[in-house]
Image (cartoon, rainbow, N blue to C red):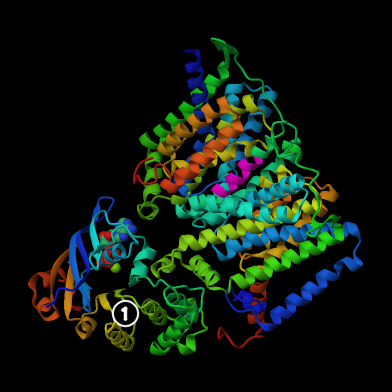
Amino acid sequence: MSEDVVLETRDLEKRFGGVRAIAGVSFKLRRGELRCLIGPNGAGKSTFFKMLTAQLRPTAGQILFEGADITKLHAHQIGRLGIGIKNQVPDVYDGLTVHENLWLAASAEAKPTAARAKVDEVMARLELGPLAERLVGELAHGQRQWVEFGMVTAREPKIILLDEPTAGMSVEETNRTAQLILEANKSATIVVVEHDMQFIRQIARYVTVFHQGAILAEDTMANIQANQTVKDVYLGKSGSA
Amino acid sequence: MDEVAIYAFQIGFAFAILILISLGLAVIFGMMRVINLAQGEFLMLGAYFCTLITQSGVNLWLAFLLSGLAVGVFGIIVEVVIIRWLYGRILDTLLATWGLSLFLVGGVTTLFGPQSESVAAPLGRFSVGVYGISQYSLVVIAVALALLAGTYALWRYTRFGLVVRGTMQNPTMAAGLGIRTWLVYMLTFGFGSALTGLAGAVLAPIVGAAPPMGVFFIGKAFITVIAGGQMPLLGTISASGLFGTIDGVVSYISSSVVGEMGMLFVAIILLRLLPLGITGRLKRGI
Amino acid sequence: MALRVLGLTAPSKKPQPWWWGVVALLALFVFTIPLYLDVAELYSISNFLVLAILALSMSFLWGYGGMLSFGQTAFFGLGGYTYAVLALNTGETTSALLIAVLLPMIFAAILGYFMIYGRISDIYFSVITLVVTLILEKGIRATSGDQYVIGSVRLNGQNGIPTTPSLQLPWDAKAQLDIADVFYVAAGLLFVTYIGLRLLLLTRFGRILVSIKENERRSELLGYDTRRYKWLAFVIAGGIAGLAGAMWGIWGNFVGPNMFNLNQAAQVVIWVIVGGKSTLIGPIGGTVAVQYLTDWLGTQGVGQVSLILGIILMVMVLLFQQGLLPSAGIIAAFAKDRLGLTRRGRAS
Ligand SMILES: Nc1ncnc2c1ncn2[C@@H]1O[C@H](COP(=O)(O)OP(=O)(O)O)[C@@H](O)[C@H]1O
Ligand SMILES: [Mg+2]
């Protein structure tokens, strides 16, 4: 396998007071991958994503994007480099319309005409057309998730980080989200945090397991499912595993 | 030598004044994330109360304590009527307390008139070389230190202090442990108000009592508290030390207005470097 | 919701054609006022118009930039003093007016750099801006000595500069504007400021600014350097407040330290709160209403104006969060709902 590493962390660490939420994570992501990140609640997945996007400052360690150290950059600089994130909690402009939300995302990079075209394209792809003039705050939970997904992709990032993109979605919506992610993966490297094993089997080839702030295992989906340590970590959660 | 002593005194006095005018504000801010824009008017109320009761024959030292008590009770009323309804809405609390400040200035002017009331400063003066220093200034410094020590002791060694610190660290958990956080907030606001009222009373023999007197002090008080950061005691002490030095020296060389401008200037630059104030990065403590 | 009921559009929405019609009608109305009011009334209405420009500076910053500056009076006073000092020194008022806008912008740029690029919290921002205007006031008050002279102009401390000249025609220094002329200039500048801000909010800059107010972190993650947009908004608002200050000097032929003071600063906040910060037109109405009230109270001699203002501020914050105009909208919406006049629900 070629080693075109697009994102790497070295001994990344984050403490909250005395708690080591991330305890030395060294992680490599190859270009074009669709990686799944799993792990029990509190394993540090969201914290990890937030450090990658400069929403949190690491206590120690390094983050490299395409070989360059980005550990000390600001969030907007990370965004400009081409790392987009959908946070676990929906993070949209509730007081603005769907169209405006997408326009703001598209305009961050593109020229006005290109941005408008991009907005139209994303709205068509996500079937948000009829909702264009609705305030995002008035939409159902699943629709808001898609708006945010649309915003992240409208930005045309090189890496997309998705923190629990299907939380609170119906089975049908979840399947559709899986399709959207596979489609977006054609042009971007993607990391998805998920709990739904069914969903992960649908999309992932390679899986990283987080446990207590560290990487417990990293392998293909088939091997991970056979891995006894991983099973132990998820013990009592066998329903979802 | 006299020169050195007089500088030391200037700085010490400026430090004490900053402690007096900002300690109550800092206690409330550190605990409740609330900045009471009527802080200056609470000082004024303390000064008025002290002036009025000494004029009717109460002993000055006793009047200090009574003023603190009276403004403390007033603070509790304010908490119940205004502050309580605005928890979590920090900017609205600012606005409402600003309204309170205008209301108090207008109210006191209506009641007592715009003229200034005064109390004679007790004690005499002594001299350091060619310089004269009023002994009362030393009392001011002593009171400031006593208030600091008292607040520290209350926070550190009493059950109330423990509960307050717990609530400050983690209100949700404190509530989960059965602490009545509303009561803690109310008492903290009352305690901060009492400190402020007492400070106003102690200042009364120096500056008198007049409706606009609050405005004279609040600029400095806000700068001190904001630059100090969230920790009421350590923040106030360090910021007062820094700004007291600037204020004392600059005011002595130039004028008090220039001293205050110097404070503001340093504070703004400081905030660029430490946006959360001097104690902003420290996680624990008081 | 509330805004929709009143037919007002949300920020960053293209104004409806009828909006331009309403603005034009309003302009027509305002510009005919001098035909049927006497000079004294004209004089006091001009004051409202000038102060409304100051209110716009704050409501733009707060309502659309999410920055609650308590100290727009700092730029207001600075603009006034800049105008007075320059006009008296040079005998020429057009450039003095321009510089009275520029200098506060530069001051805002420096102050804003430290506050906004330092990412200080909202509460610190509000309090620091307040302290800045308080300390400027003290500074100006301390300039009563003979040594405080800029060029040939004494600053006069407490007493201010009572010889502040009125505006001249740019091409004719001898043609001083009279009270009616000043009224026209003030009205014209208010309309220009209002329409200018309304249009600014439709631009890329304006829409991004509103997005930052909505959710600053999201804007950052999308790659916008939010500090730059906020800083620019702060500088623009500083310029508008400076313009208001210069016009206030022109209007009253006077500038003084009270332009900076706490009461003045509180009034700006009250105008905007009463009018509601979610529109730009509301604060203009709020300014006129509150200012009319305080003027009236002043003439009635019913005690302390600040007492009344304090009560208004507390009541507004505790009971009418949205401002009077939008609150009226909410009540109207509620009433409509109750009476079953609308069957459309929330559909857009
Ligand atoms: N802002 C914070 N302050 C303190 N502790 C935090 C904070 N954010 C997360 N944590 C802690 O860090 C750990 C990891 O949390 P998180 O990254 O949200 O886990 P996950 O997303 O895997 O469920 C948890 O123990 C959580 O309590
Ligand atoms: Mg999580």
| Most foreground residue, C13 or B116 | C13
Q: Which residue has dot 1 on it?
A: A166
Res A119 → quadrant? bottom left
Check residue A91 for magenta coloring.
no
Check residue C136 for magenta coloring.
yes
Where disc 1 sits, the SS reads loop
Q: Looking at the image, which residue is at 48% across and 89% down?
A: A130
Screen quadrant of the C terminus of chain C: bottom right
Q: Looking at the image, which residue is at 50% across and 44% down?
A: B268
Tag 1: amino acid: Thr
Name the dominant secondary structure of the magenta segment.
helix
| Most foreground residue, B117 or A151 | A151
| B156 versus C113 height, above or below | above
Q: Position of residue C97 (x, y in %)?
A: 71, 55
Side (left or right) of A121 relative to C135: left
| Most foreground residue, C144 or C295 | C144
Q: Position of residue C310 (x, y in %)?
A: 68, 50
Q: Position of residue C15 (x, y in %)?
A: 64, 79
Ligand 2, image quadrant it occupies? bottom left
Which contiguous range is marked in magenta?
C128-138
